[in-house]
Amino acid sequence: MKPSHIDWCPMIPDHWEEKRIKDIAFLQSGNSITAMDFVEDGKFPVYGGNGLRGYTNTYTNEGDYVLIGRQGALCGNINYAHGKFYASEHAVVVYPKKEEITLWLGETLRTANLNRLSMTAAQPGLAVSTLNLQFIPFPPKDERIRIAKYLDKKLSEIDHQVSLLTSKRDAYLRLKKSIINHAVTHGLNPNVKMKDSGIEWIGEVPEHWEMCRFKDAFRRWTTGITPDSKNYKYFESDICKGYTWVTISDFLEKYISQSNLNLSDESIKLFMPPLSLKGSLMFSFKLSVGKIAFADKDLYTNEAIVSIPPNNGQCLEYYYYMLPNVLHENATENIYGAKMLNQKIIANMLMVVPPLPEQRAIATYLDDKCAKIDTIVSNLDKQISRYADLKRSLIDEVITGKRAV
């Protein structure tokens, strides 16, 4: 091995060269495209900065190419395009100056972590002029061919294993959803008499269960707020700490326990009581409709979150499992195609309401069943993650010459 001038690859094999990207290829951004140009059943794929964006009936390129994401938080990511395709203005097409091995070139650029060259934090982006001047390790052609063949074989084997694990994971998630749906609409007694709920997507429910509007089941429920010019000072003060601000992005587990932002103004305690009390069930009704979690402490929430306080007349654990489907089925699309709910729709949503003892029994049953499935899914996720690490390590070792092939 010998020292190189490449910051991400300080050592390369003695017989390898270092070359600038512009010495190997010509880089050019794709063409602009508007939403009107996308066609659901279009003939040709459209690639943007993060990969496939949709389809259209015209194409800009034909062949096998490496694409570099040009804009956005993931700028610098690498994708491949084959056959006829449309490259948008957010993708940089890599045109080799001589016949080149596409897989070797793409994985070399991926290993270079081009995202580190991003120019701004607000709207990250890459300049072609900057990319052109980057040096990469350049093995002899016969080695580039061997590297490509080796990676193609090994990565295909890894991808196959990941595909099997992912299919297994997805099957368990479908099983979990099926178990939840059956329990919250049919109960736990397989011999119970059934009746038509009158709601197509629910179907039959136990004869003694009731159908109830959300506002009749929960007389008390609140929506959060978003800081604006009138109250933002409260969120900047550091007089007294204590409350936590959460948004939909914090709904990662059943119980929210991580602080996002500590609010700390005495006037909040006086004039702005917590919007979600400890034990409240919270759900999103804008954008990520149906995300749901419990508050394990007094919280502040934003305007996209509804909070149901602890209720002696209802088992909120049951509604944790039942509500997501109700929310999804009642959501409507806004002008941008996003699923949304409003206060009136939420208030009038129809729900299946078993007697309180059955609510508790169903919640306990689902806690047990879902915990077991979640453990299996977590183990599968860890295996998938290990294969991803193996894949990255393998590519790095081969591309930088640490592993001879």
Image: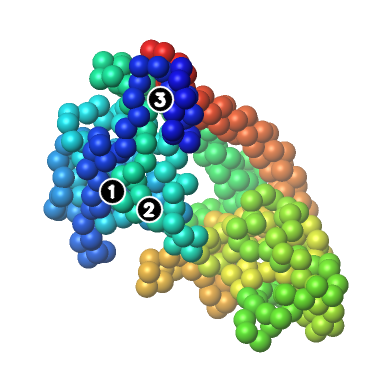
Res 207 → quadrant: bottom right
Circle 2: residue type: Leu
Res 56 → quadrant: bottom left
Nearest the eye: 378 or 399: 399
In-image side of 134 versus 354 (left or right): left
Q: Secondary structure at mark 3?
A: helix
Residue 127 rendering spot, x and y as whole percentages: 34, 54
Residue 368 rendering spot, x and y as whole percentages: 72, 38
Q: Residue at x 52, y 55 (%)?
A: 202
Nearest the eye: 5 or 340: 5
Pointers 1 and 2 in contact (C-beta within 8 Å): yes
Crowding near pointer 3: few (<14 within 10 Å), some, many (20+)? many
| Residue 92 badge | 1
Pointers 2 and 3 in contact (C-beta within 8 Å): no
| Residue 126 badge | 2
Nearest the eye: 22 or 59: 22
Residue 120 visible at all: yes
Nearest the eye: 299 or 294: 299
Residue 199 rendering spot, x and y as whole percentages: 49, 61
Q: CA distance from mark 2 to mark 3?
A: 23 Å
The residue to which callout 3 is attached is 399
Circle 1: residue type: Val
